[in-house]
Amino acid sequence: MASKQASVASFVESAPPGELSNVVADIKALAGNDASLLQSLEPAFRKYNEEQYATVKLPGSSEAVIVSEHNSMGDNRYFDTASQTSFQVEHSSQTASAVQQHPLESSNADLIRSLQKSFSKAAAEHFPSSVVGIYPTSSDSDIAILLVANKYSPQNFWNGRWRSTYTLSPSSGGLKGAIKVDVHYYEDGNVRMSTSKDVDVSNASGADAVVREIAKAENKFQEELNRAFVQLSEGSFKGLRRQLPVTRQRVEWEKIGGYRLGQDIGGGRSK
Amino acid sequence: MADPFDAALDLLRRLPPSQTQKNLAGIISLVPDLEEELLSSVDVGLTAKHCPKTGRDYLCCDYNRDGDSYRSPWSNDFDPPIDPDDVADLIPRGRIRRMEEALNAAVDVYRELYYEGGVSSAYLWQLDEGFAGVVLVKKGASAGAAAGKGGWDSIHVLEVTEAASKRSAHYKLTSTVILDLGLKSEAVGGLELAGNLTRQQEQNLAIHGLREAEVEQSHVANIGRMVEDMETRMRNLLQEVYFGKAKDVVGDLRSIRPLSEAEQERAAQREVIGKMNR
């Protein structure tokens, strides 16, 4: 039973962007009437939502807010600094309820407020759709800067997610974090791209400078990623299967017995 | 409630392709009844084995497996040996084995021409009306840090129905290519591009000659040509999906160029067009 639970939990935790509900429907079809197995998934849902920066809409608001371990208060409650509220999350349905006032209390409150403004504005310059979150860390010494952008196109069999996570130390001006991009394509197949790139910038002081450094690092990463696609295509992909044989001619299958390997082809055989 | 087998296939199409083997085991632990059906319909990465008799490598799949033993296409022996009582049912002979040997030799040449390395194997078995088979190719590449690592496994399952006249045959080909690519660098961090695509094709092709040897040779040539065409087509498709589509989706998520700049440009264009139409 423990291994069954571990399996279904790993299915949930590795669900592609935008496909959690499909994965859950499949699990239900496979688990049949095993209600306790489905109930055991609650921690996996929480882990998925917190790691993937699931977004929820607060009751009575059209703005989406992030769910993550950076704004977790425990017991499935999370806080949002922009609206200065806290809310309860039902992880399996990704819904929020029980909104309460949650005034921002931090020694970096001013910086958090200006980051909120400038980071939202800067994000809108590069992401057609994104949700950001700026949170004081639990010790209040640092500030967590989060962004999630999703683009789902299930009718065309692809979905994608971009996550940025940075920790800013206002005292030293150090900015550290990681960019993660996940793409799933599944038309008559299953192709997954995942990247994780660490970012480390020093001397980022003041909200505007921080936001500028992030945009610079992200632009550079994206340009490098585009170059990496070319590198892989020209490098290892090309080294796997040629488009045409060295002879530049398709195989003459009727005369295949006449090919003298190693001579006609030019390459030696190891066997 | 959805059919468990369909749900299993749907799930495997969604979860990370690099974990298919592990996820397959997880699904089977949930629904043990699906084991046989899933193992014969889900393609997983191929493994190579060494044939002790001929000294050549061959590829393992569900079609040359009996328990923990695999049949070498070069020696036609199972390794480790299987119960002699089962041998008669599991080892091809006569016409099927002759075509299997010819197909292995032909695919070997094909593999050398297109892959310049790697391992290939072909297995055939008798059906009531015709025969079926699988053609496998595996190639790994480690082109150095800058070019990244890669692995290609192709699995072509075919079903051949012979017309009563023996002048033609119907070939149904289901091909899967499993392609794993990866790159680690300071500039891009870790990049994994892994997955598989499956395509099908059916064709009626002529059989040349009347003598049995000519018919057999015709089948081998027809199968070979179909596999070559399909792999060439799939290679282009993989290139498009792995490098074109992935890049486009990232570009849809985030634009390197500021969106306001692009919007201003569009507004300026609209203005020009508006003036021209006046």
Image (tube, coloured by chain):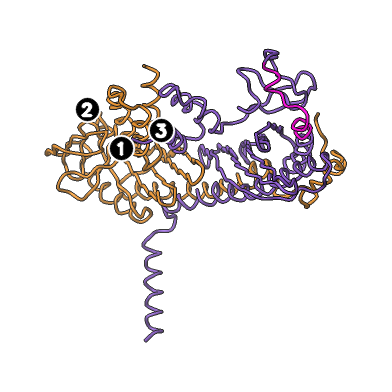
Q: Which amino acid does label 2 sit on?
A: Gly
Q: Is residue B93 magenta?
A: yes
Question: Which image quadrant: the C terminus of chain B?
Answer: bottom left
Q: What residue type is labelled 3?
A: Ser
Residue B27 sits in quarter:
top left
**Mark 2 vs 1, N-terminal side:** 2
Q: Give the residue at x 31% y 34%.
A: A50
* Residue carrying label 2: A74
Furthest-bottom residue in this view: B278
Query: Which chain is assigned purple?
Result: B
Q: Are marks 2 and 1 on the same chain?
A: yes
Categorize mark 1 by other alpha carbons within 10 Å: few (<14), some (14-19), many (20+): many
Question: The chain drawn orange is chain what?
Answer: A
Q: How far apart are marks 3 and 2 (CA)?
A: 23 Å
| N-term mark: 3 or 1 | 3
- Bin the neighbour count of mark 2 within 10 Å (Cα to Cα): few under 14, some 14-19, many 20 and up: few
Q: Which of A188 and A12 is in front in this view?
A: A188
Magenta region: which residues?
B86-101
Is there any visible trace of residue A218 in the rendered image?
yes
**Residue drawn at point x = 36 percent, y = 39 percent:** A22
State the image quarter where residue B134 is shown: top right
Residue corresponding to mark 1:
A144
Q: Which of B175 and B209 is in front in this view?
A: B209
The residue that label 3 is drawn on is A14
Quick one: SS at disc 1?
Answer: strand
Disc 3, disc 1: CB below 8 Å?
Answer: no
Chain ID, mark 2: A
